Image (spheres, grey):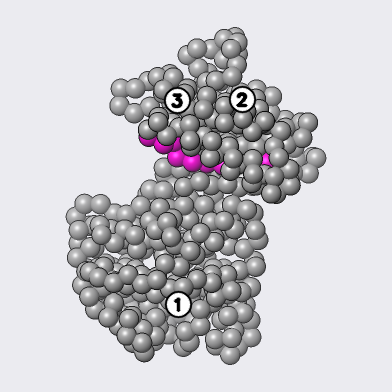
Amino acid sequence: MTEHTEAPQPSPEDRITLRSPAELADALPYLLGFHPDDSIVMVALHGAHGRFGGRLRLGIPGGPDEWPEVARQLAECLVSGSAKRGSRPEGILVFLCQDPSGEEAAQEVMERLRPLAQSLRTACGELDVPVPEALCISGGRFWSYCCPDVRCCPVEGSPLTLPGTSVMAAAATFAGIQVRGSLREMEARLAPRAGRAAAAQEEVLDTVATELVPRILGGVAREAVCEETLALIRRLLGRFAGVSPVGTHHDADLRDDALVTDEEAAAIIVGLQDRTTRDRAAEWMEAPDVDSALRLWRAVARRCVGSYRDHAAAPLTLAGWVAWAAGDEPTARVALGMALRADPDYVFAKLLHQGANEGLDPELLRRCLRKERAARTGSGPGPAAGGVPDRAPDRGPGRRDGRGSRGGTRPLAQANRCRTRRRTGRRGARSSG
């Protein structure tokens, strides 16, 4: 999935000048908000001083036969996107990031990817945009594909700067910019379970889908399923709010998984395939619910296992929306990218992904959600939290009831105008948006 983002414009006192390949390699995680594993990254440069502009990331295609065409598409995407947002770039930086696997050495990775780097340089040159630097980052070292001087760019590569010791790291810390680990680590927090736990969850999903899908497709019963799903989400948010995450991300995720039973996860997964329910669930987007909501959507996405993997589009999109609304754009883009891998036609994810990548203000959508909720409930806009805040008391894992706020208006109607496409069958009904 391609990610194309536009860089914010710094004030003169906030600007940092990067003069060497080492400084560029060190800056990359701060430009993206994470370490881009197995990625092509391209950064547009503007003006006489090479100000950073739009950034684009794509997973490295496995087949070298694909590289020339992929390079052409990426170059055109970055150049045309930059032009639409103000001006064509005067240059483009290229980064190829891939760690060695098996017995392959980092230097061998660099040589294997050299044709890809050349394809990217050629594609940019054909658009009259030079590539002043192209770097390979692998195994804790970096190489330049452009600099022939072995005094500054030795054949064996140069070690990356120790984390947190560079000028860029100090400036990022001062500015409050966080690097959230590697792309692989971020995706692992949203990836489906494996092993016995996955098999058990899939069995429960089959049972719950058999019960709920006919009701979702059954008119009045569909509204009842919506209310039941939202009531369950309320209780789980209360449960999550009462347990603070501790330890590593892995430990925190395991603890969150234990807060949700297989039956509860299955009910939410199937319920969210109804677009109205999903749109109502998107209202949990601000304090005091935002942190608990992101943890819940991650936990639910991890339960979309086996033949239900494409059902993850809904909870992944909600995770991306909550992260974006909270100002965590790197997490939002990763979650939304995974949602589109689960279902490339998922319209809500497409809209949010485009908005996050183009630097739009999520407050516009928050206002829409608040207005739709007010129209549905007959109340005023209410507090900023806006997200169906009246939680039912939690009776512990495994207990469900049907209480919840009334109404079935789709709160994303203005932002997500699309026809509902339903798939039926063993795995249940799903909406495309």
Q: Which residue is mark 2?
A: 133
- Marks 3 and 1 sit apart, C-alpha to C-alpha, by 46 Å
Q: Residue at x 76, y 31 (%)?
A: 49
Amino acid beneath label 1: Thr
Q: Is residue 302 left or right of residue 286?
A: left
Q: Please tell me whether mark 1 sits on a helix, a strand or a loop.
A: helix
Q: Which mark is residue 290?
A: none
Give the secondary structure at mark 3.
helix
Residue 180 relative to residue 105: left or right: right
Q: Residues within 10 Å of mark 1 (few under 14, many from 20)?
A: many
- Between 326 and 397, the residue placed more toward the observer is 326
Residue 57 is covered by the magenta coloring: yes
Compared across the picture, whether 27 is left or right of 401 comes to: right
Residue 276 in percent (x, y) is at 45, 77
* Residue type pointed to by label 3: Leu
User: x, y percentage for residue 404?
Assistant: 42, 85
Q: Which mark is residue 276?
A: 1
Q: Earlier in the sequence, mark 2 or mark 1?
A: 2
Looking at the rendering, the stretch of residues picked out in magenta corresponds to 53-62
User: In what element is the residue under mark 2?
Assistant: strand
Q: Residues within 10 Å of mark 2 (few under 14, many from 20)?
A: some
Cα distance in 3D space between marks 3 and 2: 15 Å
Query: Mark 3–mark 1 contact, CB under 8 Å?
Result: no
- Give the overall secondary structure of the magenta segment: strand
> Which numbered dot is residue 113?
3
Q: Is residue 335 visible?
A: no
Quarter-of-image position of residue 274? bottom left
Task: Tell me the quarter of the image containing the C terminus.
Answer: bottom left
User: How busy is the neighbourhood of tag 3: few (under 14 within 10 Å), some, or many (20 plus)?
Assistant: some
The residue lying toward the viewer, choosing from 242 and 339, is: 339
Q: Earlier in the sequence, mark 3 or mark 1?
A: 3
